[in-house]
Amino acid sequence: MLLERYLESLGSEAIQKALGLDGPRPALVRPTQDPKFGDFQINGAMALGKELGKPPRELAQPIAEALAGVGAIAKAEVAGPGFVNIHLAPAWIASKLTEALRDPARNGVPAVEDVSRIVVDFSSPNIAKQMHVGHLRSTIIGDAIARILSFMGHDVVRDNHLGDWGTQFGLLIVGMREWGDDEALQAAPVLELERVYKLASERAGNDDAFAERARAELAKLQNGDEENRRLWEHFVEVSRATLDAVYAELDVSFDTWLGESAYHDALPGVVEDLLARGIARVDDEAVCVFWGDIDSAPKALRKQKTPFIVRKKDGAFLYSTTDIATVQYRKEHLQADRALYVVDNRQGLHFQQLFAVMELLGVDMDLEHIGFGTVLGNDGKPLRTRDASGNVITLVSLLEESKQRARQRIEEGIAEGRLRVRSEEIDEVSRVVGIGAVKYADLRQNRLSDYQFDWDKMISFQGNAGPYLQYAYARCASIFAKGEVDMDAMAASATILLDAPAEQVLGKHLLRFADVVYQAGTTSQPHLICEHIYELARAFNGFYAECPVLDAKGPTRDSRLGLTALTARQIRRGLGLVGIGVVDRM
Ligand code: ARG
């Protein structure tokens, strides 16, 4: 159940009734800052003071009285200049939790009424270049957002917009002829392509004839030359294999892989259209959108001196041109209502300009740049992607290291008697913990901020880290194992009762789940789910310290097992929504 939405409707009904108004008014429900003052605050009377010409406190009084009679509310009182503080009734919370307990498929989270088709454009690395940590962030954050939106009931298209087209391929074709090593290309394709690309672009910088050859090969490729097409396909194919290995390890998948090359044929039309409509103009043989020219452009762009270039002087199309064609495709062929671009903050200006051009073109679609900050190393500088001896740290080796470190921690935990993992399960548990730790360290942060990559904090069974939450889940599961109680059977029959204060605290956390999922989904902020699960795990600890579960009797025991099951399922679901797995025994 969406709690705040429900309280909003209760509140606005109470306002209308209590004040004898002709129609409903917003109740403006907010969680209270301090639980001492209740659970939620209704601020509607404050806004009505002006409209009705009365002091808000005077209006708040009858509203509080009307609310006090409602089943969900134990107490409603006027506070401050005219808020109404409400305390939820434990019996009502308990009944809602019992409903959620009967709903293992959705954990009490309703499906959206208005389904949107949403493209999530994420990961999107460049072929022939090492996928870097920025792409890792995009992959992890984008996957989480796609999972959350799908669970809410939206129609999500996960698209990997590969950088698989453009000038680098001319250089690669001539470079591979000169320096290419087929064996290396098979064994470590991306490394080999990157090596050759570097050599080729260096050479092109000081050898005009070489640069000219590269341009000619690119033109041939773009005009459909068979030999070059074959080479390009081969580069893409071997790179795909490397990418697939990373995605498999991360448990990330895509519905479409429509890279930049997919839009090649549409590009001339895009430029002609922009020229014909007077959005772009020719400047020194290039085609550009000059923001100073366009009265209806967003204010922030009007001052932008550098134009948005859509065709270079030499006739080549750019990233910008492809992105315009991509939006059009998503609108026309995918009938998308929204597109989310999960891309580094540093591309902010590009997307600002792209979205403004689409607006000028009259494409009616909700476009959002879901930016994120930089991953920093221990020195506070952007995380280096090379080790001390200059070797590239690949994503696969990073994930491998995480699994190794997780295994070490787990073995220590077993030796010290803190963890219980069967020897035949150590591989699997290390994998789930190691990969989960990398993902959680990223996702628990507000995506817009930079964060420091720190192995010790990341792989920790204490504090706000992935392993701690996976452990919290396993502990809930172990209570069922120890008591030989079947979780699902019990969940189908138990009734939740909230008597002890620690039960009430836990119950209130559990009740917020649907709101948190919706908020995370609508604002593209997976960290809200991480925060919720972390706080939930702590509330569960408080409950478990105060309230015996297996040793309790009768309906109290059933209820406490029910609370344990709800907690376990919410942790599992919450972690699942951000792409992190759990294990039952740890
Ligand atoms: N390939 C780009 C890069 O690595 C990211 C692409 C993001 N998606 C897009 N539609 N522009 O920087």
Image (spheres, rainbow, N blue to C red):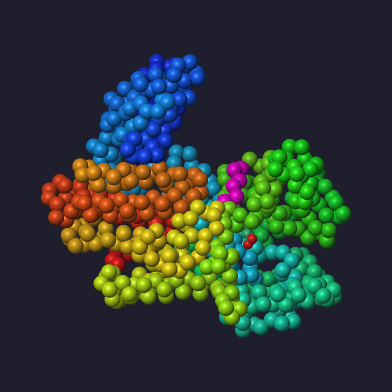
Left or right relative to 490: residue 353 = right
| 196 vs 586, nearest the viewer | 586
Q: Is residue 427 above or below residue 23?
A: below
Residue 209 lies left or right of residue 202; in this view the side is right
297 or 59: which is nearer to us? 59
Total number of numbered discs in the rendering:
0
Q: Position of residue 230 (x, y in %)?
A: 68, 73
- Residue 495 in the magenta stretch? The answer is no
In the rendered image of this protein, does residue 304 appear above or below residue 441? above
From this viewpoint, which residue is outermost toward the front?
A: 80
Q: Nearer the viewer, residue 389 or 437?
A: 389
Whether residue 22 is situated above or below residue 429 in the rendered picture: above
Residue at (48, 62) in percent of width and height: 252
- Identity of the residue furthest to the right in this view: 284
Position in image of residue 294 (x %, y %): 77, 40
Using the rendered view, name the quadrant where residue 460 is placed.
Answer: bottom left
Residue extent of the magenta highlight = 365-370
Q: Answer yes or no: is residue 255 visible.
A: no
Q: Residue at x 71, y 82 (%)?
A: 179
Q: Residue at x 14, y 55 (%)?
A: 551
